[in-house]
Each structure stands twice: as structure tokens, then as C-alpha cells.
Image: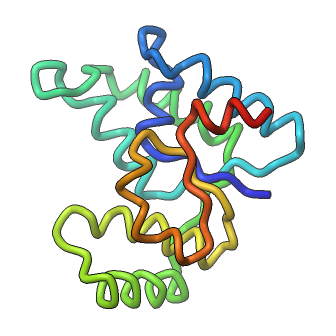
Amino acid sequence: MAVLLDTGVLLRAFDKDAKERDEILKVIRTSWQRGETLVVTLQNLAEFWNVSTRPKDKNGFGLSPEVAARRLRTIERIAVLHIESAGSYAHWKRLVVSLKVLGVKAHDARLVSVMLQERVSTLVTLNERDFDRYLPEGIVVSSPAKAAAKF
């Protein structure tokens, strides 16, 4: 089984004050122990960098590029990077047109399109409801708490 870790999950895995951190670390640790593949996309990593290096007064973490780069290397050690392809673009286009996806929600469709192309079954996210429209595609969407409770 392959599990995509959404950007908010990645960010909170490093945030010692995040209430979801223990559950996120349990999901990561248990997935690894079970031999499941943890997955990220370029979009996740770009968003991770954006929030990590954005100033705190602009709703970011205010980290230096050096610290953000160390965190990226940690993610790269635990997760496989799936890059978008012509196939995932075809899924994305079908999704946004058929579901009438608007504005920023097109980013969620990008994640789902990579999941469909690469046969990633599960998404762990803090924003489950954002992905409800994609459930008929056969993906499983879970919060860190729900995913941790399954272990």
C-alpha cells in the first residue's frame, strides 16, 4: 500500500507544538514498519518550502533556507517523490473539468491525479472534506487520527 502525506501533515510532523504531531509520527513510523510506501509530490514539497521559509508574520514558520533544506532531506529519506506526468495531467484535466473544480481547489486535484496515476491508495491529510469529491475515484482519505487509530 502507498500513502500520500499531504503538506499540512508534513509541516506538523516537524512542529513540536502541533496537536496532531504524535498521531502523524505514529502513522509514519507504523507505515514504515509495515513496509508501506510513503509518498510525496513536488507540489507538497514546494508548499512545504513556502510555509517553512515564509515569515511568521505572514503565517509561515520563518525558518532559514538551511533549516528548511534539512527538513526536506528528512522527508526525502522517508518518502518516495512522485512527479507529475502526462498521465497524471490527463487525470487532473478530467477531474477539474468533470467536477467543475474552481480556483485554489485545483491544487487538491493535482494531488489526486498523481495518486491515480501512480496507484497511491491513501491520502493522509488534515483537510479530509477538501477531498470528498474525489472519493468516487477509489481513493481513501484519512486524518492522522483516523490513520493512527487503525494501527
Q: In front: 127, or 41?
A: 127
Q: Which residue does the image show at 46% across and 25% down from the upper left?
A: 12
The residue at the far right in this view is: 34
Q: In front: 147, or 93?
A: 147
Q: Which residue does the image show at 44% across and 30% down from the upper left?
A: 11
Q: In front: 19, or 135?
A: 135
Q: Quadrant of the N terminus?
A: bottom right
Q: Quadrant of the C terminus?
A: top right
Total number of numbered labels? 0
The residue at the far left in this view is: 57
The residue at the far top in this view is: 17
- Establish if 76 lies above or below 139: above
Residue 100 appears left or right of 95: left
Picture coordinates of residue 71 (x, y %)? 51, 28
Q: Which residue does the image show at 52% across and 36% down from the upper left?
A: 72
Q: Which of the 4 image quadrants contains residue 26?
A: top right
- Establish if 110 lies above or below 49: below
Q: Which residue does the image show at 69% across and 48% down from the upper left?
A: 38
Residue 75 appears left or right of 148: left
User: Which colour assignment does the render follow?
Assistant: rainbow
Residue 63 appears left or right of 150: left
